[in-house]
Amino acid sequence: MNAIVGLSYLVLKTELAPRQRDHVSRIQSSAHDLLAIINDILDFSKIEAGKVEVESIPFDLDRVLTSVTDTLSGKAAEKDLEMHFQVAADVPRALAGDAMRLGQVLLNLVGNAVKFTDKGDVVVSVEIVSRSGPTAQLRFSVRDTGLGITKEECDRLFEPFVQADNSTTRRFGGSGLGLAISKQLVELMGGTISLQSTPGVGSTFTFTVTVGLPEQTGQLVRMVPMDLRGMRVLVVDDNPIARIILRASLEAMSFAVATVSSGPEAIEKLAAARPPFELVLLDWRMPGMDGLETARRIKAHPALSRVPRMVLLTAYDCEEVVRRAEGLDLDGLLPKPVNDSVLFDAIVDAFGRDAASAPRAQTAASPDGHPRAALAGARVLLVEDNKLNQMVGQALLEGLGLTVEIAENGQQAITMIEAERDHFDAVLMDLQMPVMDGYAATRALRELPGTAGLPIVAVTANALPSERERCLQAGMNDYVPKPIDPDRLRVVLERWVQPRGAPAPSAASYPGDASQVLPASPHRGEADAQSASGEGLPEILPGVDTGVALRRLMGNRDLLVRLLRQFASEHANDPEHIRVSLARGDLEAARAAVHRLKGVAGNLAAQQVFASAALLESALREGAPAPFEAQLDDLANAMKLVTQSVASLAVST
């Protein structure tokens, strides 16, 4: 059969008369069909004889799903069908199991869905059913809007050599073994398979498999090189399923998402948006105005002061899209269905490749070579109760050329602003603080005469849409997600702050110069009194991304060493304190402690501590059932790694 397939392919590459080409094409097509039947029979025979053993080796779930897409997207496009992948945010991507057999089952089920569907969608969803130690059970569903079958036919469909009826074989071909093989493979992988179907409506195949969770894997945490969390994203797609899935994926990445179903709606929403959208995901094939025409009109729209970055999505001929998109200067092109990792990479690429040239029209350089930001001379009040976060925030703001004063809670901020109404050009407001939180402080400030135009920017570690809406309702103008990214902060401040035109700080005050140490401040805490040197700071410090941390601190290595020492000293025992709070049922104290630890770890780029704290905070917020031993152990191990690194750093420096 391989010879027939191969030789017919070679014959088709030669000069043939139309009638000959038709005959050889039919030979090749029939050979492929027969080869598939032979493979099914061989697979079924091996399984029946007990000769098939499933493996348990590490694999990437996204790669398995991408393989299904690569194989079947062409057939789906031929029928104008859209395929969608919907993977729950808590499903680990790094797993252990038999990726080849899992892919075989998915190819069979998704292939059938495409084959038996003439109009509509095919949706593949994945969710986690349960975890137990080093294993987890996943549930896969393949839903179509195809022919559907009766309940009686459902009951016998998993038997070998059975299809829905005799006309199925004549119309679609096949051996009737695919579902029988899939059932046996699923059972070998520790799961079950079932079917729900309604004639004329569609079918849903559901199966479970047991997979391993490799050590040190846990939940995938995607860290963007430029902290884009909280960024406003507009999804434009006429397909409601695509809008729902894209929104869920983007919100899981902590973006603020809105959706519309057409190009005209997108243009209207972009023109009215305050603050503006920074990214638009555009479907290509839409009725009336397609994605390319929508992109052209967005770029030419007179009401848009800033054109958002745009990524085009298409389930159809990418080559045609590329040809038609020439000259539009789009920021990305993604084939559908889009999995989370590919979507994430496209967004990072869209912003990362131009991060250095993000809007800096008002930025100039001084004769000594140090940047003089457009914000130079503006005065900012930083409202933050945590000393370490105060130090990071002050370093970052002074690096942008701002003059910084600090309030330790909302009440102190009100007192300082009441004393000098016109003294500050903006307020950076933390949300969770003792005495008076950021929400209450903002509402109180808005009631003071003369503060209506004072920009108040929330600094929040929670970028969920409900939190952002609460910030806006309290009277805040904008938000910056924690951990704070310099470019993200600069863009937000330039959006709201009108600088006073004062001279920029001298070169010595810019912590971007690694040889300089930030001037002493009464708000910096005791760590500033300690002697420290950044000369021995290694490029790789286990548990800490020093590159990201130094970027936040504008390159000040000495300050980073001091902050890390203080972090290890003050927070080393936090995981145990959280464990004690949970043991005595004090969930509020545990949540507050986890939130504080997450915020500081994020600002210092202690990435695994940040990720582990974020997962534990999410579990506590969503009311997940106790105990939280696995999350606590992950957090303790991550914190232990950082403290050990800092201890070795203290010796070496």
Image (cartoon, rainbow, N blue to C red):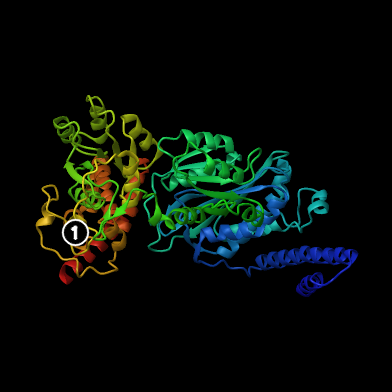
- In the rendered structure, the answer to whether residue 47 lies left or right of residue 331 reads right
- How crowded pointer 1 is (Cα within 10 Å; few <14, some 14-19, many 20+) is rated as many
Q: For residue 462, which quarter of the picture?
A: top left
Quadrant of the drawing holding the C terminus? bottom left
Q: Secondary structure at mark 1?
A: helix
Q: Quadrant of the N terminus?
A: bottom right
Q: Give the residue type that dot 1 points to.
A: Leu
* Residue 621 x, y percent position in the rendering: 34, 41
Position above or below: 446 against 602: above
Inspect this view and state whether residue 650 appears: yes
Q: In the drawing, does residue 520 fall left or right of residue 53?
A: left
Is residue 628 at all visible to an observer of this figure?
A: no
Q: Identify which residue, 481 or 617, lies in the foreground.
A: 481
Which percent across, then down, holds residue 209? 54, 56
Q: What residue sits 64% from the left and 41% below the top?
A: 286
Q: Position of residue 324 (x, y in %)?
A: 64, 52
Depth order, front residue of 36/301: 301
Q: Residue at x 56, y 53 (%)?
A: 334
**Residue 495 occupies quadrant:** top left
Residue bearing the label numbered 1? 559
Front residue of this view, candidates 63 and 494: 494
